[in-house]
Amino acid sequence: ALLRADDSFTPGALLKKWSNVSDFSQPEYPSGVANFMELLEQAQKLPANPPEEPIQYNGKVALITGGGAGLGRIYCLQFAKYGAKVVVNDLMDPEPVVQEIQKMGGQATGVKASAEEGEKVIEAAIKAFGRVDIIVNNAGILRDKAFNNMDDKMFQQVLDVHLRGTYKITKAAWPYMLKQKYGRIVNTTSTSGIYGNFGQANYAAAKCGILGFSRALAREGAKYNIYVNTIAPNAGTNMTRTIMPEEMVQAFKPDYVAPIVLALCSDKVPEPATGRLFETGSGWAGETRWQRSGGAQFPVDVKLEPEHVKQQWKKLLNFNDGRADNPSDPSAGTEKIMANMENRSGKKGAKGGDGDYLAKIEQAKNAKADGTDFSYTERDVILYNLGVGAKRTDLPLVFENDDRFMVLPTFGVIPTFNAVAPFSMADIVPNFSPMMLLHGEQYLEIRSFPIPTEATTTSYPKLVEVVDKGNAGLVVTGSTTKDKKSGKELFYNESTVFIRGSGGFGGAKKGGDRGAATRVYKPPQRKPDAVVEEATTEEQAAVYRLSGDRNPLHIDPEFSKVGGFKTPILHGLCSFGIAGKAVVKNFGMFRNIKVRFAGVVIPGQTLVTEMWKEGNTVIFQTKVKETGKPCIAGAGAELMDGGKTKL
């Protein structure tokens, strides 16, 4: 966002344009610092900024290191202007700034100490005001020298003040912020730390370290309402006067950096409000993020030689082939490595080659599956019913000798779990990675009633369609399940998966209409006819997986972290079964059911299923009670006989 660089450039004015700050629809790909002189010239041509959105820090205590001059002084004055009590920390003399604030009618105290004396600084803040809410780690020095001429002392001095000073101040304040469950921290990196700069190996190392430190703290602090962000400011100060011409020092006023610092320390930044990096100066502020190329994959069962890497070098450096992504969490660092674990030289669909995906899709559609057998008994039926929340008092679901013992219709998804498809995902979409796959929708049709309580079945998967969503591929797989003995069709499933990063192959942009299988149901604008609350247990996923879906994402904490989840999540098809059970209990057996998976459920959370009966159809949606967010949406089930057969 670019705003006019004058007195109308305030935190509130910037917040009004915050959507532009983090808008990546037309990103830049810099390899160095922005042209701030050009930005300043553009900013001065803009009209005055609109009236600011009210922002106040009344009752909040803000601590600014390096607050005696330059950027730090401006931060101190601005926080005081907006009602904060200010702690001015500086190794030189903080008193002139303290007096400035007091003359303005504000409250301030000075702490003359190095930022490395974190305990002393925070102790003084607590003694003066009883708490600390906001920290701006701004203190810094320069000791520029070509690396060949830099000695250990010059390197260590810069690391101590910048990185260690940021750590010591934050470490001393952290217990207070944890206790009050509130904290706003802005740390200062530099474009030297982001992009590197000649003669600043020490400074760049310290500033890059601060960025990593901030990202880690943002993750630790988020659940305690402690937000940590990082800025790379461009301003003319006594420190930068040693490396900038004087006219630039005069032009790049610190006043044009302060608005983003104050905005980040407010409670008005839209989510995600923590863990972000911003470059700013001259009336401009923009978010900076990583970009990673799609890279190249090599079979894990073949010794990797330098020549193999050299052959793929252009692919490794290609950011324009539609495969590049923007990783933002630790799991992104290992997801592609984990996804490549199944890439073997002799395996059909091994990654590495290009191909005509449209032709391969047509071939896959015409391919016939040999059929995969699956046998189940009454024990397996009971285990599934328990996996979707059946209680010991639900005798028709858990006691094989009950006269009404039955198979829940959603059991129909189970026989297809390990069915062998006549095609490989890697053949029909580019850049296939199982780590990038999301289960989007599920359709199930029950083709024979009553469902046998024990049988040997054969499932025949097939490719229904592949849709090109540009930055993703959408693959629909159908599977017909037959009773092996009689040949009678029992179930038909359609599973829709969304594969991030696997689009752009020139396929159809829109899927076909297959009636109930593609229908999206819209809940009526009235109160539900029935609402069922069901608490899942912390062991829900551990039980459900025994029915066949043994994806470690649902049981192994380390694997779930790779997938981007802090803790193992519940199977989408388990939530599907719980919702289907609610429909059967309240309205009767259904002949088909269609759902769209809309969110994540953590085992132990409570599912709330709202149902509306419209003619012979039950429209429903399921939400997570603890978050209010949907996990199943656009769902509906067509009743078998008007709902006469109930559980």
Image (spheres, rainbow, N blue to C red):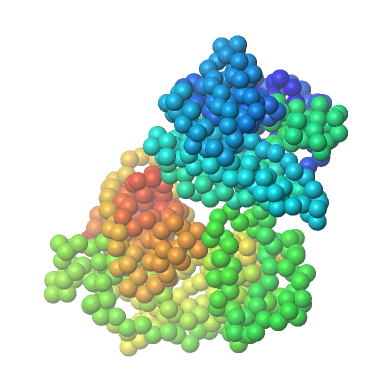
Instruction: Report the front residue among 421 and 451.
Output: 421
Left or right, 332 with reference to 545:
right
Instruction: Report the front residue among 471 and 343.
Output: 343
Q: Residue at x 67, y 45 (%)?
A: 157
Q: Which residue is drawn at 57% across and 60% down?
A: 332
Q: Is 32 placed above or below 309 here?
A: above
Q: Residue at x 42, y 84 (%)?
A: 372
Q: Is residue 537 visible in this depiction of the protein?
A: yes
Instruction: Report the front residue among 493 and 265.
Output: 265
**Quarter of the view holding residue 167:** top right
Q: Where is residue 394 in the image (x, y as percent from the top left)?
A: 17, 63
Q: Is 499 placed above or below 134 here?
A: below
Q: Is 290 placed above or below 40 here?
A: below
Q: Is 594 placed above or below 478 here?
A: above
Q: Position of residue 91 (x, y in %)?
A: 62, 31
Q: Position of residue 130 (x, y in %)?
A: 42, 26
Instruction: Report the front residue among 335 and 104.
Output: 104
